[in-house]
Amino acid sequence: MISKEQIQQEIEKTLDSLNSVKRAQANPFLFTRIKARMNKKADGWEGVFSFISKPAIAVAILLLVMAVNGWALWDGSGETATADSSNASVSELASEYNTVASVNNYDYENMTNE
Amino acid sequence: MSNETELIERLKQGDESAFKVIVEQWQDMVYNTILGIVQNETEAEDLAQDVFIKVFEKISTFKGDSKFSTWLYRIATTTALDHLRSKKRKKRFGFLQSLGGGGSEEKEQVPDFHHPGISLDNKERSAVLFKAIDALPENQKAAYTLHKLEGLSYRDVSEVLNTTVSAVESLMSRANQNLRKQLEDYYNKHYR
């Protein structure tokens, strides 16, 4: 068993153990490693840019973008036609059952069959 | 124009030889600061590289309002603390995974950290102290490391941490209290 004073002495000695600490030294090849990492980073982007800037790839990307745009436009107009036809079938259905075409949730209570 | 200002100007122009001089001049300071905070030599070296890459990329934002060394200490401290936060997040995620049965349930054993600048006769004591420092809240840990390991004055620490001198005094006082409490627990258990 150790006394309270002895524990306090241990604490003080431990806290003082950093008083004479010397600065840790970095790896002497740190700059070489930094340069290697920076070059690798730059090569990565350069690789991407040089691939994209090849004429065949550039034209292919352009055609692809135009095709996607064209498809989006064609698809958009098709959707309007579909919407129109679905509205038409709703009104057909409504007239068939002799009900109001614009039925919504709130209309359920007031629905009348003539 | 001082040598330091000239170097910074040359680095802003993208001069690689200026960058080399800057790295060689400040590498020990950056490495020692990071090492004190992360307490792992391999991680500290990787982070020191990150710091200098950030310096190279962000030098245009350095306006000279503070000392270059203060700016460098700030980047080093922030990088080290960010690294600790991300490590903590990963550890928490690993713990959740282990609860879900997805990961290993073995508890990671953190080895004692021995700072290379500590004399042999203080090696064991300082390992106990570093373990206690590691448990401090991050702003206390940063202040304590900058003051004790880098020998910065409270004023310099306050500039690095972008706070007041009295706030640093308070951080240091709380850090010392926390360390004493932890060491007391440690020695009470150790000598029981």
Image (cartoon, coloured by chain):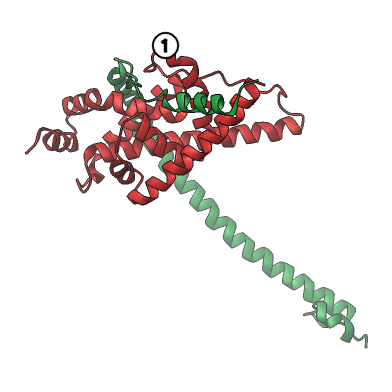
Chain colours: A green, B red
Front-lying residue, A26 or B116: B116
Q: Residues within 10 Å of mark 1 (few under 14, many from 20)?
A: few
Of all chains, the one bearing label 1 is B
* Res A48 → quadrant: top left
Find residue B139 and report its horizontal and vertical position in percent.
45, 42
A53 vs A83, left or right, is left
* Res A97 → quadrant: bottom right
Find residue B79 and report its horizontal and vertical position in percent.
41, 36
Quick one: SS at disc 1? Answer: helix
Residue found at the very far right of the displayed protein: A113
Find residue B175 and report its horizontal and vertical position in percent.
47, 39
Which part of the image, by quadrant, shows the C terminus of chain A?
bottom right
Which part of the image, by quadrant, shows the N terminus of chain A?
top right
Front-lying residue, B95 or B164: B164
Question: Where is A55 relative to B39, above or below?
Answer: below
B12 vs B167, left or right, is left
Under mark 1, the amino acid is: Leu
The residue at the point 55 percent across, 24 percent down is A6
Name the residue that disc number 1 marks. Answer: B120
The residue at the point 36 percent across, 51 percent down is B166
- Residue B185 visible (yes or no): yes
The residue at the point 14 percent across, 34 percent down is B4
> Could you tell me how many numbered marks the image carries?
1
Find residue B33 and report its horizontal and vertical position in percent.
36, 30
Residue found at the very far top of the displayed protein: B120
Question: Where is A60 relative to B65, above or below?
Answer: above
Residue found at the very far left of the displayed protein: B1
Front-lying residue, A60 or B67: B67
